[in-house]
Image (cartoon, rainbow, N blue to C red):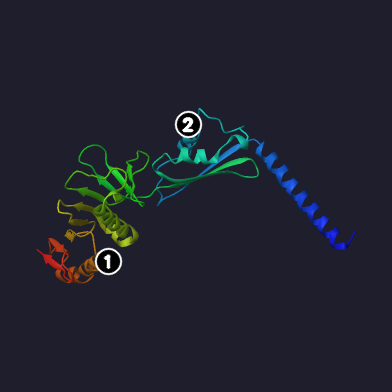
Amino acid sequence: MSKEKKNILLYSFTGLLVLTLITFSGVKNAHRKIDGIDITIAQEDGNFFTDQMEVMSLMTIDASDFIIGSELSELKPKILEERIEKNPFIREAQVYRDLKGTLRVAVEQSKPIARVLMREGEDKYIDTEGRILPVNAKHTARVPLLETTFDFGWEKSINESAYGNTVFELLKYIESSDFWRAQITHIVILENGDIELLPQVTKQKVLFGKPENMEAKFARLMIFYKEILPKKGWNTYRQVNLKFDNQIICEQ
């Protein structure tokens, strides 16, 4: 037999051996039992809208399913992930088993960026994806309040309408800035679609106009805070109007 043929046979045998070992290892691991569960919940600015007990309850459907002692082949991680993600405050869940037989559960929470003041019923949250979430008894997020002068018409997401998209962009802009996130505490949507902002520190109402040209309007508002108020006095003006391009209209 030629050397070349011997090498081919050797490589084929080695490949078959490796494939057999991998298959054997996979079969063996599939029959290993889950002997522990480790649940990790990522924080969102220190907020915890769920906990390990709630995640466990979601996975096991209120303890009607058993995980500890089950074989890996009996578990379907995708189904467990879908159960966990039924909690609206859980943005994403990943379930997998490590080599020691521990079931690892990694949970990423949703992050509210505004709290909607509802005229009737309980308030709602809007998260970073625009989803409408219920209030949560476990924790209250420190986010701007959003008030409408009409009935709040969005059910599952604020992105359900074109105007809702523009409001969402405004909320994301405020959320992206440490300064504006701390300064803007109340947002009012008027019947005509205009926006009013109520600040945390100064007393002036901000007539923002339509939720558009955000960068330019907030740049003018920063000029008002940094250059006009220190010279004229912090309580001199009742409101500031940013509705018109390239203008800062201060009203006493």
Which quarter of the image is occupied by the C terminus?
bottom left
Q: Nearer the viewer, residue 6 or 162?
A: 6
Q: Amino acid at mark 1?
A: Glu
From the viewer's perspective, tell me whether residue 85 is left or right of residue 17. Answer: left
Give the x, y percent position of residue 89.
Answer: 39, 43
What is the distance, in whole Å, between disc 2 and disc 1 at their CAs? 47 Å
Q: Residue at x 24, y 62 (%)?
A: 212
Quadrant of residue 236 within the rendered picture: bottom left
Q: Which residue is label 1 attached to?
A: 215
Could you tell which of marks 2 and 1 lies nearer the N-terminus?
A: 2
Give the x, y percent position of residue 131.
Answer: 34, 47
Instruction: Assess whether mark 1 and mark 2 are in contact (beta carbons under 8 angstroms).
Output: no
From the viewer's perspective, tell me whether residue 127 is left or right of residue 55. Answer: left
From the viewer's perspective, tell me whether residue 62 is left or right of residue 120. Answer: right
Give the x, y percent position of residue 208.
Answer: 19, 60
Q: Nearer the viewer, residue 225 or 156?
A: 156
Q: Which residue is label 2 attached to?
A: 61
Q: Is residue 28 above or below residue 225?
A: above
